[in-house]
Amino acid sequence: MNPQAEELNKIIQEKSSVAFELLSEKGKAIFFPKKGILGQTAEAKGTKINATIGAAVEDDGTPMRLEAIASKIDMDPSLVFPYAPSFGRPDIRAKWKSMIYEKNPSLAGVELSLPVVTNALTHGISMAGYMFLDAGDEVIVPDLFWGNYNLTLGHAYGANIVKFNTFKNGGFDLDAFEAKLNEGKIGKKVVILNFPNNPSGYTPTETEQNSIVEIVKAAAEKGNKIVTMTDDAYFGLVYEEGIAKESIFTPLCQLHENVLAVKIDGATKEDYVWGFRVGFITYGMKSADAELYGALEAKTAGAIRGNISNSANISQSLLLEAFSSPEYAAQKASKYAIMKDRYDAVTEALKEEKYKEAFTAIPYNSGYFMCVELADGLNADKVRKVLIEKYSIGLISLGNLLRVAYSAVAATDVQEMFEGIYNACNDCK
């Protein structure tokens, strides 16, 4: 093992043997290279003639660039064209951390890691898999989950995706979650909690979230060592009262010494910048300190360095400027209002009694999506194809469900969409 990896491992072992045991073999072996090319480049910073880094500069020392590109970007070239650090830019890491505290007031006084920048959520989940999953490890997810987990965690790292029933009696199936978490021997457990959920569009109530946390705590008290990955892709888009407003990461990161909470989030959906590809991994653990977090950050950055080198500088720069804009909060509130109007239009349309003959909505209250479960005898994929061919409506079929991304549908078109679903169901009977 590389001595730099051993150095990080020693820190983690001394600070938390649990955190060390939760690391995958790849996670234990990885490190961020402080020596070699990166270290020598850092030492040469500020020299008159710097011929270390593999980037080109103009004769005046500014980044070399094509005017055909630079003329389209009204920003300082130093914020656009050079490489960003593998950890992410320090300024946006600090800003995102402060925003996590603002969005989750219950974190006041809780020590967290500095977020590490990823190439958005998918890459963040993949890097969490790199850090914590070995071939054959189980990842506990609800049976309604984002299918990309299969690629990022299953096929890429050889993990086994194991599922529990998502809903019971119109709410989150706490019994199924508890049973799955406590299944098998006491040992390492990995859980993904994605709220608002894709595809269902459900966030637990405050009471349900408290119960989920208590279930995790009880499992930890039995001696299980647990990684909780919170996929917060749709964080903030909650449309009903009584629904948990703060990320479930908030209580999990201060829950128990046997629980390592990993927050995976980003600007993609929160700030409507799907193509920017800027996400973050943040760690939280009871009794953890800056030294432990620093070691985990270094390993994560090493995994990123060996995977994509670093995330895009221009995206980080644009986002940081937006976060600092005096108009940012009002503009976000305006877009939230549009999303809420679309959600309300869905809820209003579904009051139509005749629709129950063909489909019923499964629980939803947040995010981008909701799903309808088709009546017995109907095939969701056949209905989906009829919707395209006859009604010019596009949906996603998942088993006997149709997923509706109302985030992409104008509120004025929602009624027509559900009427089309109803008619397509009748066509397929």
Image: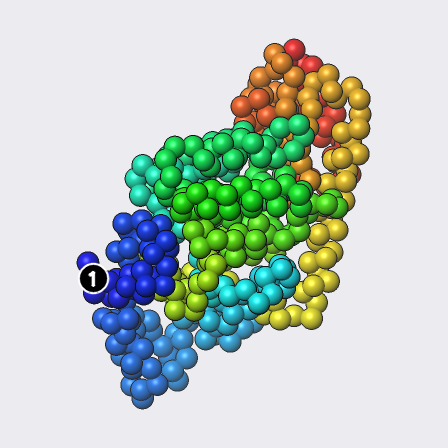
Under mark 1, the amino acid is: Asn
328 in relation to 247, above or below: below
Residue 411, image x, y percentages: 75, 40
- Rendering quarter of residue 13: bottom left
* Residue visible at 46% across and 37% down in the picture: 181
- Rendering quarter of residue 362: top right
Viewport quadrant of the N terminus:
bottom left
On screen, residue 65 versus residue 111, left or right, reads left
On screen, residue 108 versus residue 89, left or right, reads right
Residue 316, image x, y percentages: 50, 65
Q: Nearer the viewer, residue 89 or 115?
A: 115
Q: Nearer the viewer, residue 239 or 169?
A: 169
* Residue visible at 66% across and 43% down in the picture: 207
Pick out the residue farthest to the bottom. 48
Viewport quadrant of the C terminus:
top right
* Residue visible at 38% across and 82% down in the picture: 61
Residue 72 in view, yes or no:
no
Residue 395, image x, y percentages: 61, 31
On screen, residue 122 versus residue 326, left or right, reads left
Q: Nearer the viewer, residue 384 or 155?
A: 155
Tell me the crowding category of disc 1: few under 14, some 14 to 19, or many 20 or more residues within 10 angstroms, Cα based. few
274 in relation to 116, above or below: above
Q: Nearer the viewer, residue 427 or 97?
A: 97
Residue holding disc 1: 2
* Residue visible at 41% across and 64% down in the picture: 293
Pick out the residue farthest to the front. 222
Residue 127 in view, yes or no:
yes
246 in relation to 69, above or below: above
How many numbered discs? 1
